[in-house]
Amino acid sequence: MPRATSTSGSSSGREPVALFYNELFLKHEAPFSHPESPERLRAILSLLRESGAHDEVDWAPFKAASEEDIEAVHHERLVRQVLEASMGGGRYLDPDTYTNTYSYDAAMLAAGALKAAVDAVLGGEYRRAFALVRPPGHHATPDRAMGFCLFNNVAVGVRHAQRTHGVQRAFIVDWDVHHGNGTQDIFYEDPDVFFFSVHQYGAFFYPGTGAMTETGAGPGKGTTANVPLPAGMTDAVYQEVWNRILIPLIRRWQPEIIFISAGYDAHWRDPLAGMRLSVSGFGWLATQLLRAADELGVPVVATLEGGYDLEALALSVLATVRAMQGAPLPEDALGIPDGGPPSRDVLDLLDHIRAIHQI
Ligand SMILES: [Zn+2]
């Protein structure tokens, strides 16, 4: 695939990174004030421009996914439901999940961005790609739109990698603060896709799934790993999760491609959750994950999921893009909560999860 635009990416000694974005994503708008709003992408694009990153990355072209692409991970009736809701001018598909006239097209294009991102990295042109899309996808189950998500973008990307590029082992890292229940459901019995999710977990926290005992089923037994955490966890805890669980799982799995469901709602300023990660923390998580991918010589495709404090979201996406470029991380203008070292209880929990997965 040719580069979309000629940029200074490679000439500056930085890793070329492909980004995927389209203004149609802004047209999927809620009728009333809703946290999953077009302002999220506007804030990200605006900071990317301000920081100079916008002109250092490659903005790659892409097309909408086809119904067949969507139906490789969803039931046909979900596709029909979203299409009919949009054609009817839009309605709520559940108490959180709205549609308008443009939602079907935006959702098809978001899924298409993941296909194109997979093509970009498996075609050898790039090693790293980031789809800046909405609506997000990781809550969308085989037959249900939920949690602001219509179609499961990352799952469409994984299936495309399998079917078009012959990928046999894929790994998905979901660091959104909410459990990626939809992605888990889609791949729960799939022995070829490892799904890892770290998330806030506890009474009344959405969506309520993602216990550590959920590890896959049938031929997919052992290919799902959940790290459910109490609220309040800081950078130091997430670093332990990476060092003790995620990185060892990736090394053992030996994937051919790594996907990131990159939500930024574990940031301490996020209004929907109670974690205390910082912008620097997200930069560290991205950097270490990329390092693990480089060790294995495999590409990384990230896709935007949640993140509802606009400033924290934009800065954390920028930190991820900078990490992908191999560039210095931006200054953490919002500050880093001081939490001290992880508690004994949390370390015990991580040990327990290690034991479940025989790490
Ligand atoms: Zn989320």
Image (cartoon, rainbow, N blue to C red):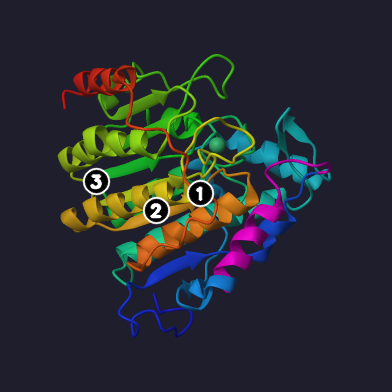
Report the front residue among 176 and 105.
176
Q: Is the residue at mark 3 in contact range of ligand 1, meaning its CB lies under 8 Å from it?
A: no
Task: Kindly report which numbered mark, 2 or 1, lies closer to the viewer in this rendering.
Answer: 1
Report the front residue among 46 and 312.
312
Q: Is the residue at mark 1 in contact range of ligand 1, meaning its CB lies under 8 Å from it?
A: no
When asked about the image quadrant of residue 338, the answer is top left
Q: Could you tell which of marks 2 and 1 lies nearer the N-terminus?
A: 2
Please give left or right for residue 83 compared with residue 170 in the image: right
Q: Which residues are magenta?
A: 31-49
Q: Judging from the image, what secondary structure is the residue with disc 3 in?
A: loop
Q: Which mark is residue 283?
A: 2
Q: Quadrant of ligand 1?
A: top right
Q: Residues within 10 Å of mark 2 (few under 14, many from 20)?
A: many
Which residue is drawn at the image coordinates 37% and 66% (left, top)?
A: 328
Residue 191 seen from this side: yes
Check disc 1 and give the amino acid type. Answer: Gly
Q: Give the Cα separation between the discs numbered 2 and 1.
A: 13 Å
Specify the principal SS of the magenta part: helix
Which residue is under mark 3?
Answer: 168
- The quadrant of the image that shows the N terminus is bottom left
Q: Residues within 10 Å of mark 3 (few under 14, many from 20)?
A: some
